[in-house]
Image (tube, rainbow, N blue to C red):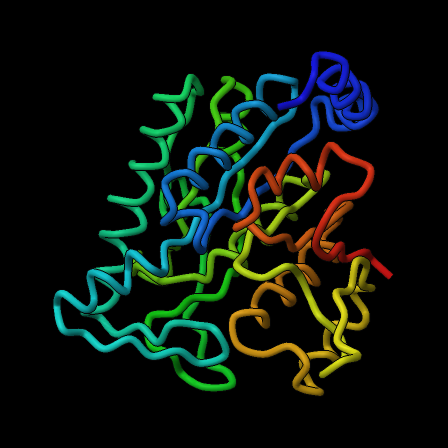
Amino acid sequence: MLSPLEKAGVLTEALPYIQEFYGKTVVIKYGGNAMIDPDLEEMVLKDVILMKLIGMKPVLVHGGGPMINKWLDRLQIKAHFVDGLRVTDEAAMEVVEMVLAGKVNKSIVSRIQNLGGKAVGICGKDGGLIHARRKTKPQDLGLVGEVVEVHPQLVETLIKEDFIPVVSSVGSGEDGESLNINADTVASALGGALKAHKLVLLTDVEGIFLGSGESKRLASKLRASEIPGLIESGILTGGMIPKALGCLEAVSQGVENVHIIDGRKPHSLLIEIFTNEGIGTMVINE
């Protein structure tokens, strides 16, 4: 337990960061183990509420892969991934939309409100938020979407009315068809459209690692210009590819800071934003 003096020291250290981020929009991508561990989920959502109460404007974008897999297994629909993206046929898309825009989204909203926050849950189809098209290159993944345009007016209205927007990553394609979009991609595109001060991707790894074997190390800071080469060389693989590409997209659209951090660590969000040390990998626009 911290003594009262130690607690005061923590608050004092956080003060310049609170001043820096006051009134600023921060987009947070929430997913992975932090969503399926009830204790971690409560910590993350309390951290988001705290950010709101001290004057920041958090926007929560969530995935739900483990829950989708659970329901696909129940319905005996086999899951298949290519470069971290879920191949999605019509049957799988029905499950994805039901789980993401329904069960998971409303569960997060309910928990935020039970913890004393104010939240509204939406998906990319609401208010024309995310216009997407089918992702067909380098191969056709079915009803998997890539973002074409983001119209953030609905999210901006919710922020103005003092709500925490909770956004699920289902977008609207041509003729209104539902498309499954990677949540990291949605968070990055939305961060760019909102001109967010910071984008934080909560994930199941500590950040981006460089090298191999004994020389393998966590990159605390990475230039966006390095990302394509890391993908081409095979250093970044699987689910880290859409995260890294999302970082690249976000900084190119004006997001000032992008961070990939380990959402399995308690209060990782607050540590990254309000302490001198920080954790994970920060991607900068160079």
In percent of the image, x 71 and y 70: which residue is there? 209
Q: What is the x, y in percent for residue 257?
A: 75, 47
Q: Which residue reaches farthest left?
A: 75
Image side of residue 205 versus residue 258, left or right = left
Q: Give the quarter of the image for residue 143.
A: bottom left
Counting the numbered discs, the total is 0
Q: Residue furthest top?
A: 4
Give whichever of 283, 24 is nearer the camera: 283
Task: Report x, y in % for residue 273.
Answer: 71, 36
Residue located 58% across and 69% down the image: 240
Farthest right residue in view: 286
Give the residue displayed 39% in from the left and 69% down from the top: 144
Residue 49 versus residue 82 in the image, above or below: above
Q: Is residue 236 above or below residue 101?
A: below
- Between residues 202 and 147, which one lies in front from this camera angle? 202
Q: Is residue 161 left or right of residue 134?
A: right
Vertical placement of 17 versus 148: above or below?
A: above
Residue 241, percent from left and from top? 59, 72
Which picture quadrant has residue 64? bottom left
Q: Residue at x 27, y 55 (%)?
A: 97
In which quadrant is the N terminus drawn? top right
Residue 107 image position (x, y, % from top left) = 30, 37
Relative depth, front residue between 14 and 246: 14
- The quadrant the C terminus occupies is bottom right
